[in-house]
Amino acid sequence: MITRMIIVTVPAEKAADAERLWKAECAPLMIKQPGCRSEEFLRSRDNKGEMISLQQWENQKAIDD
């Protein structure tokens, strides 16, 4: 199992829009990919514009495909 984090930073005033976009479009596409076991969206407490996608994958090949 591989844990992957994608860290994205947007201007604080765009954070709510970025979160909606991630949850509505990005996360559903990712979780449908073969080998993606889970996807979780996290937000920084200290930086309102920093977001993290935390994913669990079966292996590196699943990520690369």
Image: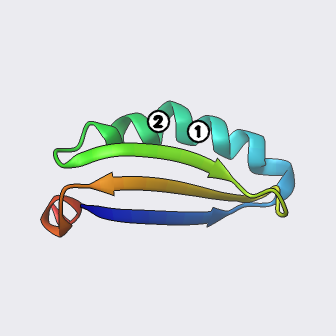
Question: In the image, is 60 to the left or to the right of 18?
Answer: left
Q: Residue at x 39, y 64 (%)?
A: 4
Q: Is residue 24 above or below residue 38?
A: above
Q: Which residue is mark 1?
A: 21
Which amino acid type is shown beneath numbered disc 1?
A: Leu
Q: Position of residue 47 (x, y in %)?
A: 82, 63
Q: Residue at x 84, y 56 (%)?
A: 12
Mark 2, Cα crowd under 10 Å, few <14 / some 14-19 / many 20+, is few
Q: Residue at x 24, y 61 (%)?
A: 1
Task: Name the residue nearer the viewer: 48 or 14.
Answer: 48
The colour scheme used here is rainbow
Which element carries disc 2, helix, strand or loop? helix
Q: Is residue 56 above or below residue 28?
A: below
Q: Position of residue 30 (x, y in %)?
A: 34, 44
Marks 2 and 1 close (CB-CB < 8 Å): yes
Q: Which residue is mark 2?
A: 25
Q: Is residue 44 above or below residue 20?
A: below
Q: What is the number of the mark on residue 30?
A: none
